[in-house]
């Protein structure tokens, strides 16, 4: 039973997670939730192992995984409705979706509105980024509005993101809670550890303008002029890699990787880094930040959006003003030249990974939210 009627305590809660995107995130969440409830996660075949090999993620408790072709071509015409049946046929007490401006999730959430099944929506970006990224046109904004209108409860990654959401969606009447972005790209327990390379800085991800690649390159120029030993790896694809490609070629301490990066290579990049840079001009939350801490690597990051909800200055990383290349260079130099500071931040990153960004801890709190939304007595 759903809605205002309580779910019987004689059986486990049933939760369906619909995730055409955010496959690793959703799979790790499902694995942690399976300790408490029956879970089915529905993923897109295109996305399922793109970022990380799902088979390498520990899953002590069994849960159900469906992988469908959700493209609008070929078999997607079958896979898309089948993915909806995967959700509804599971007879869930709660459906958990991710807000991403695409039609699949919006259509499913519209369909579920006619049922009594409550929907939880994770909002990754409460407001669009300033330059590039998702949610920056009217069509995508309409999709956001549809998803938020269908949700009974919204989760966001920290208090800053909640504040942005309340500002962007003041009419939302459902529940709102913080649910942190858990660690990603965690090396398998049986993998041989890779030691960080002294002086290596990693800047990783999809290179939109708001990510601040131009600011990062300015900071690297400063490090070179100061004769600070370093090697900067810029890895990922996106328009800024093209726009700034010639500049990077002319910088002798920059290694640019403008290509798809396999999960195995991604793991090596993070683990071989002494520090991970996130010089974002604006941000909400960051999967790169979650990946840095998942690999126990400290960060130098902009104090913008939800980043300060995760990065404690001087504990697991250093925070700098967004857009300030000099401050970024100063912070990177501190981490690269102070053995004691680097050790402190490394330990802080490890503690964050096992603490606030641990998926079991996140799932414990989220399960309480599911029970509330499903009408289960405490």
Image: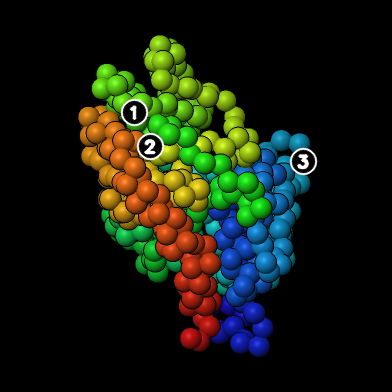
The earlier-in-sequence mark between 2 and 1 is 1
The earlier-in-sequence mark between 3 and 1 is 3
Q: Which residue position holds label 2?
A: 277
Q: Is residue 375 above or below residue 127?
A: below
- Disc 3 residue crowd, few under 14, some 14–19, many 20+, Cα 10 Å: few
Q: Is residue 171 above or below residue 243?
A: below
Q: Are marks 2 and 1 in contact (CB under 8 Å)?
A: yes
Q: How is the image coloured?
A: rainbow
Residue 355 location (% of width, % of height): 44, 63
**Circle 3 or circle 1, nearest the eye:** 1
Residue 137 location (% of width, % of height): 41, 36
Mark 1: secondary structure: helix
Q: Are marks 2 and 3 in contact (CB under 8 Å)?
A: no
- Mark 3 and mark 1: span between their CA atoms? 42 Å
Task: Determine which of the numbered discs, if any, sits on residue 216 in the image.
Answer: 1
Mark 3: secondary structure: loop
- Mark 2 and mark 3: span between their CA atoms? 40 Å
The residue at the point 55 percent across, 58 percent down is 97
Name the foreground residue: 351 vs 367: 351
Query: Of all residues shown, which one is farthest toward the front?
Result: 339
Mark 2: secondary structure: strand
Name the foreground residue: 125 vs 355: 355
Name the foreground residue: 150 vs 295: 295
Residue 327 location (% of width, % of height): 22, 34
Task: Determine which of the numbered discs, if any, sits on residue 75 in the image.
Answer: 3
The residue at the point 40 percent across, 54 percent down is 347
């Amino acid at each position: 039973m759903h809605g205002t009627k309580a779910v019987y305590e004689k059986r486990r809660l049933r939760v369906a997670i619909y995730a055409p995107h955010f496959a690793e995130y959703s799979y790790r969440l499902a694995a942690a939730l399976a300790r408490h409830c029956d879970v089915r996660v529905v993923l897109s075949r295109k996305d399922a192992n793109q970022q990380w090999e799902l088979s390498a993620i520990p899953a002590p408790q069994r849960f159900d995984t469906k992988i469908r072709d959700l493209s609008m071509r070929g078999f997607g015409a079958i896979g898309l409705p089948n993915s909806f049946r995967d959700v509804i046929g599971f007879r869930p007490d709660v459906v958990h979706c991710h807000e991403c401006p695409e039609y699949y999730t919006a259509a499913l959430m519209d369909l579920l509105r006619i049922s009594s099944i409550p929907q939880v929506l994770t909002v990754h970006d409460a407001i669009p980024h300033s330059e590039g990224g998702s949610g920056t046109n009217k069509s995508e904004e309409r999709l956001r509005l549809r998803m938020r209108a269908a949700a009974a409860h919204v989760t966001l990654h920290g208090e800053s993101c909640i504040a942005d959401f309340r500002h962007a969606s003041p009419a939302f009447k459902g529940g709102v809670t913080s649910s942190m972005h858990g660690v990603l790209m965690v090396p398998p327990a049986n993998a041989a550890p890779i030691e960080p390379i002294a002086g290596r800085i990693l800047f990783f991800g999809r290179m939109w303008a708001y990510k601040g690649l131009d600011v990062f390159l300015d900071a690297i120029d400063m490090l070179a002029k100061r004769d600070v030993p370093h090697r900067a790896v810029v890895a990922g694809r996106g328009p800024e890699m093209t726009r700034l490609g010639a500049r990077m070629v002319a910088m002798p301490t920059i290694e640019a990787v403008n290509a798809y990066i396999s999960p195995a290579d991604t793991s090596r990049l993070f683990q071989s880094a002494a520090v991970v840079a996130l010089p974002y001009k604006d941000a909400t939350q960051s999967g790169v930040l979650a990946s840095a801490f998942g690999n126990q690597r400290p960060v130098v990051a902009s104090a913008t959006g939800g980043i300060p909800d995760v990065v404690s200055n001087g504990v697991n990383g250093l925070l700098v003003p967004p857009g300030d290349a000099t401050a970024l260079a100063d912070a990177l130099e501190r981490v690269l030249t102070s053995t004691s500071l680097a050790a402190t931040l490394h330990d802080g990153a490890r503690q964050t990974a096992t603490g606030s960004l641990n998926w079991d801890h996140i799932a414990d709190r989220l399960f309480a939210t599911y029970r509330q939304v499903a009408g289960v007595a405490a």
